């Protein structure tokens, strides 16, 4: 496990983008596991900037997203499909047929979970999985539980997650209550994992995830068992380290 300290969100984003761009340059046909939310936006902006300068080529890159809200159409401005299109895909030369996101409108959850796992197998696995960290320790939408979910599945979102995500909606009532997500087993099968964390509000959960016991009550704690994890966190997110 490698830990890179960043000064602030901008510095964290740039350092993370360096790691992602290195993966693309070293393996132009790599498979990237992508995350949504506010944490990776800065890194995606940096990748777009380097693409516009001619430093990056996405033409052979394949992607698979961690998750998608259940019940939102792709053209809904809060769907993760829309998020990825607005924050990365439409700004670089990626082939849309090489981008993969769970289908939030598929009502047959077992069918969709199996379909997405088959896609990931056909891609040959994920070379670099990008992760953010939820306030309750979730990665993807894998909420605290009694077990580590193995494969892609449907999950009931906890109130803390709904509360954290309501800022993207007009009200908490509009936040979907379920989502499709890669399972913990799916995530840790990635060859390399990049965890991005920013803000003092994530300091305690980051410390618990990396220094506490490995438990499904803190889903991100499973990363302690992965052989190749890179953490890029800003000083605020690492503030708990200063007192321990």
Image (cartoon, rainbow, N blue to C red):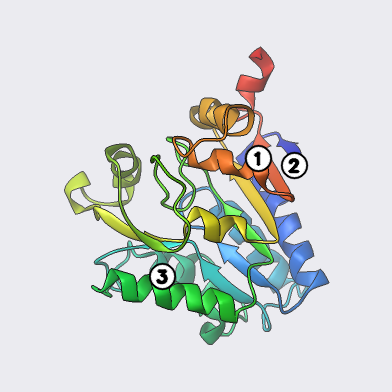
Q: Which element is circle 2 on? A: loop
Q: Are marks 1 and 2 in contact (CB under 8 Å)?
A: yes
- Determine crowd level at label 1: few under 14, some 14-19, many 20+ residues with C-alpha closer than 10 A: some
> Tag 3, which secondary structure?
helix
Return the residue nearer the eye: 198 or 144.
Answer: 144
Give coordinates of residue 20: x percent, y percent. 71, 61
Q: Which of pointers 1 and 2 indicates the residue nearer the eye?
A: 1
Residue at 70%, 48% in the rendered image = 229
Residue 1's mark? Answer: 2
Query: As displayed, is residue 52 above or below residue 181?
Result: below
Say whether marks 3 and 1 touch (CB < 8 Å).
no
- Please tell me which residue is depicted at 39% across the width and 44% down the height of the picture: 143
User: In the rendered view, would you say 196 is above or below 154?
Assistant: above
Residue hosting label 1: 224
Pointer 1 or 2: first along the chain: 2
Q: Residue at x 61, y 79 (%)?
A: 123
Looking at the image, is 199 positioned above or below residue 108?
above
Q: Label for residue 81? A: 3
- Depth check, mark 3 against mark 1: the one in front is 1
Q: Nearest to the eye among marks 3 and 2: give it.
A: 2
The reply to whether discs 3 and 2 touch (Cβ–Cβ < 8 Å) is no
Q: x and y percent of residue 189 in the render? A: 62, 60
Crowd class of label 3 (few under 14; some 14 to 19; many from 20; radius 10 Å): many
* Image location (x, y in percent) of residue 122: 58, 81
Residue reaching furthest top? 243
Tell me, for residue 107, which label it has, or none: none
Q: Secondary structure at mark 1?
A: helix
Identify the residue at horizontal 68%, vertical 48% (top origin).
226
Q: Is residue 100 visible?
A: no
């Amino acid at each position: 496990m490698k830990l890179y300290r960043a000064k602030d969100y901008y510095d964290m984003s740039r350092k993370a983008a360096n790691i992602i761009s290195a993966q693309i340059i070293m393996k132009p046909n790599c498979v990237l596991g992508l995350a949504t939310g506010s944490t990776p936006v800065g890194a995606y902006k940096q990748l777009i900037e380097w693409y516009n300068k001619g430093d990056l080529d996405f033409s052979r890159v394949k992607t698979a997203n961690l998750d998608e809200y259940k019940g939102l159409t792709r053209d809904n401005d809060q769907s993760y499909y829309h998020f990825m299109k607005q924050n990365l895909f439409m700004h670089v030369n990626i082939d849309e047929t090489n981008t993969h996101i769970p289908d939030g409108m598929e009502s047959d959850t077992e069918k969709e979970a199996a379909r997405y796992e088959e896609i990931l197998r056909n891609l040959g696995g994920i070379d670099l999985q990008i992760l953010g960290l939820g306030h309750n320790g979730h990665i993807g939408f894998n909420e605290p539980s009694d077990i580590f979910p193995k494969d892609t599945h449907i999950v009931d979102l906890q109130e803390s997650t709904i509360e954290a995500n309501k800022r993207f909606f007009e009200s908490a009532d509009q936040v979907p209550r379920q989502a499709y997500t890669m399972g913990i087993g799916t995530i840790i099968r990635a060859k390399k994992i990049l965890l991005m964390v920013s803000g003092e509000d994530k300091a305690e959960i980051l410390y618990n995830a990396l220094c506490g016991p490995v438990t499904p009550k803190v889903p991100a704690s499973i990363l302690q068992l992965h052989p190749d994890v890179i953490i890029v966190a800003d000083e605020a997110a690492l503030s708990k380290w200063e007192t321990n």
